[in-house]
Image (cartoon, helix red, strand yellow):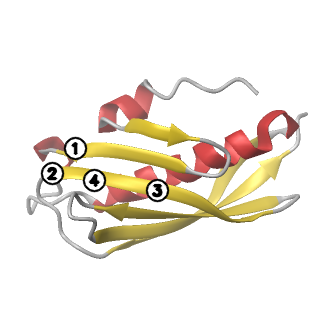
Amino acid sequence: MEIPDLTGGFVALLGLKFEEASADRVVISWQVRPELHQPFGIQHGGVYCSVVETAASVGGSLWLADRGTVVGVSNQTDFLRAVRDGELRAVGTPVHRGRSQQLWQVEITDADERLVARGQVRLQNLSPA
């Protein structure tokens, strides 16, 4: 499988940096900045959801490789701590990888390693047409 460009598009808009990307673990970091805040000056929850989805989709795609592609069918993300600034780090790992679906969990921590958000994404494995 050819590894997709992980530097453009929405990834670039959010400022995500891939520290690690494999079939077993995906690590993403980014800087919280005002343009990613919600109206009350904290990290927008949609950013957390997007990072959770990105980590799971990249890891799931790398695992499925040439056997097909993956699409997200469910994203459930919990917001646990307000963050106004600093660097955040997401670590995604598989919970289940089956013939038709995968389940990935992602934990997001701040610089003090406090859990600020966590989520899980169910991916559908699609066979090549």
Residue type of the residue flagged with mark 2: Gly
**How far apart are labels 2 and 1 at the CA level?**
6 Å
Are the residues tagged 1 and 4 within 8 Å (C-beta)? Answer: yes
Is 77 left, or right, of 112 in this rendering? right
Q: Is there a contact, CB below 8 Å, between mark 2 and mark 1?
A: yes
Give the residue at x 34% y 53%.
89
In this figure, which residue is indicated by the disc labeled 3? Answer: 91
Asked if disc 4 and disc 2 are in contact, CB closer than 8 Å, the reply is: yes
> In which quadrant will I find the N terminus?
top right
Q: Residue at x 23, y 73 (%)?
A: 81
The residue that appears at 17% across and 57% down in the rendered structure is 38
Q: Any mark on residue 84, and which?
A: none
Task: Return the mark for residue 86.
Answer: 2
| CA–CA distance in space, label 1 to label 4 | 6 Å
According to the image, label 4 marks what residue? 88
Q: Which numbered disc, 1 or 4, marks the residue that appears first in the sequence?
A: 1
Q: Position of residue 7 (x, y in %)?
A: 43, 25
Earlier along the polypeptide chain: callout 3 or callout 2?
A: 2
Q: Position of residue 51 (x, y in %)?
A: 42, 51
Horizontal side of 46 relative to 86 (left or right) equals right
Q: Mark 4 falls on what kind of element?
A: strand
